[in-house]
Amino acid sequence: MDPPPLPDETKLLEGLRSGDADAFEALVRSHGGRMLSVAKRMLRNEDDAQDAVQDAFLAAFRAIDRFEGGSRLGTWLHRIVVNAALMKLRSRRRRPEEPLDELLPRFLEDGHMERPAQPWGQPADRALESQELRRLVLDGIAGLPETYRTILLLRDVEDLDTDEAARALEISPGAVKTRLHRARLALREILDPHLRTPRG
Amino acid sequence: MSRKTGVITCREFVDFLMAYLDGELPSGQRTTFEGHLDECPPCKTYLDTYRETVALGRGVCAREDADVPEDVPEALVLAILAAREA
């Protein structure tokens, strides 16, 4: 369970519920940047991301009376902006699916890996300390075709379960699983040349 | 060098990897999968690095969310506040 709201958050909530214009502005300024970053990660387009953040704040303003304080405001707003970004993705004109095959692992005719896997040099928790590696991972995710990127973000980052992701994307749970696996395989292939331990 | 073990190849191992990690393989398939895992070091390494990939994606995005956020463009702040008044 999340900790109770900090005192300043309680005060901010009071202002929002009483319609205080300064409180709305404070909310936008304090949480807007983080929400914009989440929206950009999902949408890869500045204008769409800004639209999603605006939609999210307007939805939050309308629902503020129903916010019960069981979670932190930031957590609540995060979920709202993820939903707003999903709505934006759905409203985009359907584009032809970009192929993923070139990013997937390759196998020989007999089923062996073309390039047998080698261990990676450092565990994920230590790798996270490297700014270069963090950039590599973010760029790798950004480089996935939209369908795969969205599923990877919803399932592995936003922690939606398979059924929630299927409903959000209006596809079957089976399709979510298949695409998530392919997205992870592709991301692994992107990271592998940078992380594999050189042969000794 | 990987080799064909039991009744699955390395390609099939990779195909079933997520179902295995999610505990969704029926027991017979699970036994076959684990037989391959025991005998094929590259596939064991592949499984480890697949897990690392998931952990890195999750960890890097969480770190990005926790870091000091970028400024909100002033025009966006004004647009949101104006839309609320409308």
Image (spheres, rainbow, N blue to C red):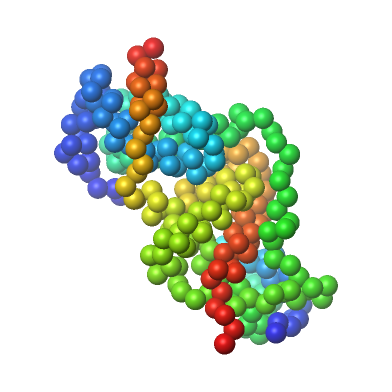
- Percent coordinates x, y for residue A45 in the rendering: 54, 37
Picture quarter containing residue A21? top left
Q: Examine the rendered structure and indicate whether residue A47 appears above or below residue B81.
A: below
Is residue B35 visible from the viewing direction of this image?
Answer: no
- In this view, the residue farthest toward the top is B86
- Percent coordinates x, y for residue A103 in the rendering: 68, 59
Instruction: Please name the residue shown 51% across and 30% down the image.
Output: A47
Q: Examine the rendered structure and indicate whether residue A19 appears above or below residue A104.
A: above
Q: How many marks?
A: 0
Query: Which of the two residues, B73 or A67, is positioned nearer the viewer here?
Result: B73
Q: Is residue A197 left or right of residue A54?
A: right
Instruction: Please name the residue shown 43% across and 35% down the image.
Output: A80
Q: Is residue B51 left or right of residue A12?
A: right
Q: Examine the rendered structure and indicate whether residue A104 appears above or below residue A7.
A: below
- Percent coordinates x, y for residue A136 in the rendering: 51, 59
Q: Is residue A1 left or right of residue A38?
A: left
Is residue A142 visible from the viewing direction of this image?
Answer: yes
Instruction: Please name the residue shown 59% across and 59% down the image.
Output: A187
Query: Which of the two residues, A187 or A18, is positioned nearer the viewer here?
Result: A187
- Percent coordinates x, y for residue A149 in the rendering: 58, 48
Locate the C terminus of chain A and report the quarter of the image it occupies. Answer: bottom right
Q: Is residue B13 left or right of residue B71?
A: right
Instruction: Please name the residue shown 57% across and 64% down the image.
Output: A191
Query: Which of the two residues, A90 or A132, is positioned nearer the viewer here?
Result: A132
- In this view, the residue farthest toward the right is A109
